[in-house]
Structures are given as C-alpha cells and as structure tokens.
Amino acid sequence: MAAIDQTGGAAQAAPDRARPREKTLRRRSPALRRAFPYLLVAPAVIYLLGITLYPGAYAVYQSFYLVRFTEWIPVGFDNYVELAGDAEFWQAMLNTLLIGGIALTVECVIAMALAFFAYRDALIRGWRIAFLMPMLFMPSAVAFIWKLAFNDGRVISDLLRKLGLIEGNLDFLGNIWLARTTLIVADVWQWTPFLFIIFVAALQSQDQEVEEAARLDGASWPAIFWNISLPMIRPVIAVAVVLRGIDIMTMFTNVFILTKGTPGGMTETISYFIYRQGFQTFNFGYASAAAVVMLVITILAAQLVVKRAFKSGKT
C-alpha cells in the first residue's frame, strides 16, 4: 500500500509542478506573447545589422571626408566628383562587368545543362554531390591552384604545347584577354555548383502534372524543358543570377592572387580598385566613395533584374 501511495503521490506531484509554468504563461500580457518571437531573433538581427548596416553607414559618412589616417578633412561631394572623372574607376567598373558578365553567362549555361541531365538521368543524379566539390574549397586555395596552372607551373601551356595547339609558352599575364580568361576560368570552376544546386532544386519543385501532360501530348524532353520548365523557374533563375552577380561585383581574391590587375589595369575589378585606393594609397575617403557608388549600382541592377523576372513570371 505504501508503494502504491508513493507512486500515486509522485504522479500527482508532476502535474502540480507543471501548474506554476502554466500560470506564468497565462499571466504574460498579450503584447509580451506577441513580442516573444522577435525577442528570440533579436540577438541575431542585431549582430547582422552590426556587421552590415554599420559599416555601410560608416562608409557613406567617410566618403565625405579626405581621410589620411587620423586626419579627417571635410570635402563634401569632392570625392564623388573626382570619381566621376576618374578613368581608372570606370575602367575597373568596365572590367568587372565584362569579366563578371562572361563568367556568369558561362556558369548559367553549364549549371543549367548539368541540372537538366541530373534532373532527368538517374545515373547522373547519383553523382550530384561530385558536382558540388569545387564550391567546398576556400577561394584563396582555388586561386593559388589556378595560379599554379596558368602562371607559375605553366601546366596549361605545357598541355596545349603537347597537344600541338601552340608552339611556345603562353604569357597569361602579358595578354589582356588571356589574363581575363584566367579569372573567368577560376570563377566558373568554383561557383558553377552554386547555380547548379539552385537550378536542380527549382526543377524538382515544379509542378510535375504539367510536364506529364505535355509528355502525353507527344512533346520531347528538350521541348518540355525549353517551353515549360524554363519559364516556370524563371523567377528562381533571376534570384540565383542576382546572388551570383552581387558576389561577382565583389570579386577580389582571384584578382589579388592571380593577376593583381595586370596587364595595365585591364583585369582590375572594382573591389580591387577600392582595396588599392584604401590600403595602398591610403585614400580611405575616396575608397569609401567608390564603395558607395558600387553599392548603389549593384542595388539598382538587382532590383531591375528581379522585378522584370517576376513580372514576366506572372504574365
């Protein structure tokens, strides 16, 4: 009987201990209950704002000064006026758009082709994880690998010479388009998997009944993909392109390790231009002005692409 009483007492004690928690939850005001989820995410939001919003606001503030270490001289919009007439800045912007545009186009084509076969072919589908391997390497390690292949080790030149395509070694840093090609190849090799995994996920999440109806009507798989699947995932493609475009606008590691802007600044991207102005000539206010201009151009371009893609997706 004592054992039974002890068991029953323990069973009654457990609900009794839970009742104070229920009473505490009931005593909370409706406003506190509504604010509770926001309080949970507040630390993460504050942290993200601290590492994104504050540096951006600080760069805008600094762009109105001539900064030489501890000496800050107000210059108003002089940095922006000087930037508008700086041929090196606009050349860096043109290099970024040219190199980034070619790299992004090649990445989209390769990633979409791989996604099409990985989505359809069961054999390739099983090897999807292998396509993601280049993205797992550090960008600096990838840059050094391609520097060894193109410049230091002359692996590419030796391979082309053995195939009989060239007679002597190629100077990848002495030719404008060869130097740009090194940056494009390095970027395409590492970041095509990023677009590939997004495209595969988009193809797998589309409505299968539409494709099945087209297949029953006699449409081939390429026709289904081009006329049905591709328009359906157009908003996803736009978002993926914008994400990669923003990343390309900040291309720095490959330029710093592979070319350093040579020859003649023809491979200098806008990020490397900002680095050179800030940390080589120590003109921090001018570098901040260039960063602000780059940010504004990136935001406007991203808004335009996404808005047009989603508008066309609705129609």
Image (cartoon, rainbow, N blue to C red):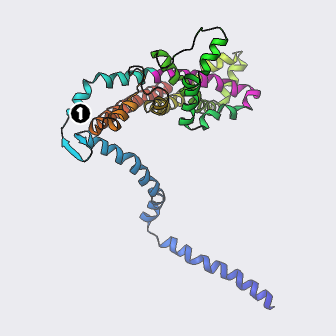
Q: Quadrant of residue 113?
A: top right
Q: Where is residue 256 in the image (x, y as percent from the top left)?
A: 45, 31
**Between residues 210 and 164, which one lies in front from this camera angle?**
164
Q: In which quarter of the image is residue 130?
A: top right
Work out which residue is located at the far bottom of the displayed protein and give it: 2
Q: What element carries label 1?
A: helix
**Between residues 6 and 263, which one lies in front from this camera angle?**
263
Q: Position of residue 69 (x, y in %)?
A: 27, 45
Task: Point out the image quarter for the N terminus.
Answer: bottom right
The residue positioned 40% from the left and 25% from the top of the image is 268
Left of 19 or right of it: where is 26?
Answer: left
State yes or no: residue 122 in magenta: yes
Left of 93 or right of it: where is 216?
Answer: right
Left of 44 or right of it: where is 113?
Answer: right
Q: Where is residue 105 in the image (x, y as percent from the top left)?
A: 52, 21
Q: Where is residue 91 in the image (x, y as percent from the top left)?
A: 35, 21
What amino acid is found at the position of numbered circle 1 in the picture?
Asn
Q: In which quarter of the image is residue 193?
A: top right
Q: Is residue 290 in sight in this rendering?
A: yes
The residue positioned 47% from the left and 62% from the top of the image is 36
Which portion, as a residue range, is magenta? 99-125
**Between residues 13 and 74, which one lies in front from this camera angle?**
74
Q: Is residue 233 in sight in this rendering?
A: no
Query: Magenta span: helix, strand or loop, mainly?
Result: helix
Q: How crowded is mark 1: few (under 14 residues within 10 Å), some or many (20 or more)?
A: some
**Between residues 183 and 224, which one lies in front from this camera angle?**
183
Q: Is residue 6 above or below residue 64?
A: below
State yes or no: residue 43 in magenta: no
Work out which residue is located at the far right of the displayed protein and give it: 1
Tag 1 residue: 79
